[in-house]
Amino acid sequence: MSSKHTNWTEEMDAYLVAHYHLKAASQIATELYTSKQAVLRRARKLGVKRKADSDSAERPTYSAEEDAYIKGFIEQQGIEAVAEHLNRSVNAIRKRAQRLGVSTASHMKALTEKEQQYLEQNLGVKSYAEIGQVLNRNADAVRWHARKLRP
């Protein structure tokens, strides 16, 4: 993430324009290695609006296939993986799952003692996704286990 100023390239602008209505500004910021505020300012400067912000746009709808995917895979893969697969924000998938009556609470497989030690040693040092790769778990599962460590 840039600490002072983002030097926007044509490729970055194109990515922003193509994904601004699909992804959260914070997610785009992470992918472009800049801040959320920089993304919001650049979108405003380029005149890019979210679909919900434009006069003629309707709320994004979900197809029967997307709903089936959410129902079938959210517990196995986690919200982040489903959101990435469907090219939607994590919050959008969470809300849709709630509307569909699908539990977003994962039934987490317990950590082994060795996995627990690895999590404790790397919490705050590595991202949930990085820890998850080593533990063969998704970032949501690692986050859930990390929360269980707090007193």
Image (cartoon, rainbow, N blue to C red):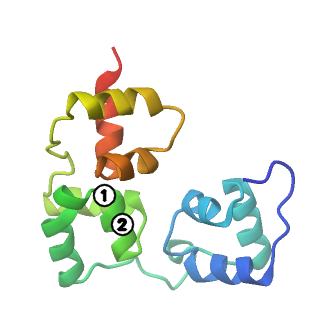
- Rendered location of residue 106, percent (x, y): 19, 46
Q: Residues within 10 Å of mark 2 (few under 14, many from 20)?
A: some
In which quadrant of the rendered view does residue 41 lie?
Answer: bottom right
Residue pictured at 14% horizontal, 67% vertical = 71
In depth, the one of 21 and 31 nearer the eye is: 31
Say which element carries label 1: helix
The front one of 83 and 114 is 114
Q: Which residue is mark 2?
A: 83
Q: CA distance from mark 1 to mark 2?
A: 6 Å
In the displayed image of the protein, which residue is found farthest to the front?
A: 114
Q: SS of the residue at dot 2?
A: helix
Q: Are marks 1 and 2 in contact (CB under 8 Å)?
A: yes
Quadrant of residue 33 within the rendered picture: bottom right
The residue wearing badge 1 is 79
Residue visible at 81% across and 72% down in the picture = 8
Q: Is residue 140 left or right of residue 72?
A: right
Q: How many marks?
A: 2
Q: Is residue 26 above or below residue 60?
A: above
Dot 2 amino acid type: Ala
Residue 23 falls left or right of residue 141 = right
Name the residue at 55% across, 61% down. 27
**Relative side of 93 to 15, left or right:** left
Coordinates of residue 42 in the picture (x, y in percent) = 76, 69
Label 1 crowd bin: few (<14), some (14–19), many (20+), radius 10 Å:
many
Residue pictured at 19% horizontal, 45% vertical: 105
Specify the quadrant that holds the C terminus: top left
Q: Position of residue 133 (x, y in %)?
A: 37, 53
Compared to residue 125, the image places residue 138 above or below, namely below
> Which residue type carries mark 1?
Ile
Give residue 83's position: percent from left, percent from top: 36, 66
Q: Is residue 49 left or right of residue 82?
A: right
